Image (cartoon, rainbow, N blue to C red):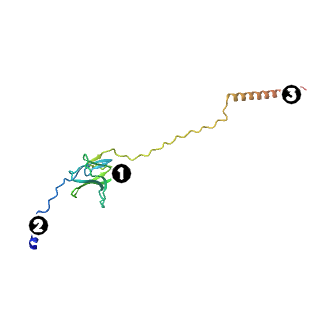
Amino acid sequence: MINLTAMLWAVLRLLILMGLFGSAPLPQATPPLITAPEPGAVLRGRITIRANLPDGNWLRYELEFAYQEDPTQTWFPIAQSEQAPATDLLAVWDTTVITDGTYRLRLRVLLKDGRVLEQVIEQLRVRNYTPIETSTPEMLFDSPTPTPPVPLQTPTPAPTPTPLPSNPLTLTPNTLLRALARGGLTALGILTLLGLLAGIRSRTHRD
């Protein structure tokens, strides 16, 4: 016959031992460390994001950004991978495709035991198209600053000179000779006529 009292005491001792010693603690994982960019940096163009990831006890890392003052805490992906990078370069962030403003950068590492390691870089100022504040601790220029395109100006064609109509009074040598000949003939005719009239008058007086 089973002794229920003895069984109950055995279970009770087991529970007491579990409460005293507890479960074995999980090994402590090295948190990720973003080395670039630094908090408060000014970002322009394409920015390289560098970080030191923990040893190979992780499944995936996720790199995201969000607006600094976004109450909804909406994060937008930059890069994610399940493969360890060859160097500390995690991603290249093209800041020219977002509006100028202040942002946050977050790196999340999912461990194999289910835990999540996280680091957030605050107050990253994107200044591609707006002036940079004078008190700037650091500026990152990983690529030339994109300049807004300047519209090309179409050259205004110069006015084409309108040719003047030909002068109808233009004299040519032939025209001048003909005019002189006509004038000479007319004068000769007039003188001849005057001579005839003078001759007729003198005959009339004689008669």
Crowdedness of circle 2 by 10 Å Cα count: few (<14), some, many (20+)? Answer: few
Rendered-image quadrant of the N terminus: bottom left
Q: Earlier in the sequence, mark 3 or mark 2?
A: 2
Secondary element at tag 2: helix
Q: Pointer 1 and pointer 3: residues touching (CB < 8 Å)?
A: no
User: For the point 11% across and 66% down, which residue is it?
Assistant: 14
154 relative position to 111: left or right: right
Q: Amino acid at mark 3?
A: Ile
Residue 202 screen position, x and y as percent: 86, 26
Which residue bears the numbered disc 2? Answer: 14
Secondary element at tag 1: helix
Q: Amino acid at mark 1?
A: Val
Residue 175 screen position, x and y as percent: 70, 30
The extreme front residue here reads 1
| Residue 97 numbered mark, or none | 1
Question: Which is in the foreground here, disc 3 or disc 2?
Answer: 2
Residue 173, quarter of picture: top right
Q: Pointer 1 and pointer 2: residues touching (CB < 8 Å)?
A: no
Rendered-image quadrant of the C terminus: top right
Residue 158 screen position, x and y as percent: 52, 40
**Alpha-carbon span between mark 1 and mark 2:** 61 Å
Secondary element at tag 3: helix
**Viewer-proximal residue among 12 and 205:** 12
| Residue 129 numbered mark, or none | none
**Alpha-carbon span between mark 1 and mark 3:** 115 Å
Which residue bears the numbered disc 3? Answer: 200
**Viewer-proximal residue among 89 and 194:** 89
